Image (cartoon, grey):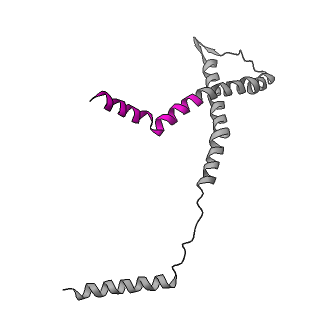
Amino acid sequence: MNIKEILGEFKSFVTKGNVIDLAVGVLIGAAFGNVVKAFTDGFVQPVINLFGGSSKASVHLWIFDVGLVFNAFITFLITAAVLFFVFVKPMNKLKAITDKKVDVEPTPIPADVQLLAEIRDLLKAQAGSTRP
């Protein structure tokens, strides 16, 4: 293989839609993480603190920090919920609206076209029966 073929193959790989979509998705996901963190710190954490929770609370089990894992799990659930309800649900609805196909009834065949089709079929049948 020469360099031109390898570069062409690489270009084909990079310009495939799914590679670009994946790259954009990863970058958007990373950027969106900051939005979710700000949402959690600005809205969710104050509500938890209002009911007696503390942002510095920690639960230790022997040498393990269970509170850290619990916090990560809650953050994941909040991230997933925000992504689902703010982005996935509306996009699915938008896609359903745009993909909605209008049922179009087939147009009836005009009588003259139907008659010509019948004549054609009869001529084909006669030509087939006269051949040995």
Residue at point 59%, 26% (across, down):
30
Estimate the x, y position of residue 111 in percent, counting from the top left.
51, 85
Q: Is residue 112 above or below residue 28?
A: below
Residue at point 51%, 79% (across, down):
109
Q: Which residues are magenta?
A: 1-28
Estimate the x, y position of residue 54 in percent, counting from the top left.
75, 18
Q: Is residue 116 above or below residue 5?
A: below
The answer to if 8 sits in the magenta stretch is yes
> Hey, which residue is sitting farthest right in the picture?
50
> Hey, which residue is sitting farthest left in the picture?
132
The answer to if 4 sits in the magenta stretch is yes
Question: Viewed as shown, does residue 113 lie left or right of 80?
Answer: left
Residue at point 40%, 36% (across, down):
12
Task: Compare residues 31 and 66 and report the one nearer the observer.
Answer: 31
* The N terminus, quarter of image: top left
Q: How many marks?
A: 0
Task: Compare residues 24 and 37 and report the one nearer the observer.
Answer: 24
Residue at point 62%, 18% (across, down):
68
Q: Please tell me whether the stretch drawn in magenta is mainly helix, strand or loop.
A: helix
Question: Viewed as shown, does residue 8 lie left or right of 67?
Answer: left
* The C terminus, quarter of image: bottom left
> Hey, which residue is sitting farthest front in the picture?
4
Task: Compare residues 104 and 127 and report the one nearer the observer.
Answer: 127
Estimate the x, y position of residue 35 in percent, counting from the top left.
68, 27
Estimate the x, y position of residue 48 in percent, counting from the top left.
76, 24
Choose top left, top right, bottom left or bottom right for residue 50.
Answer: top right
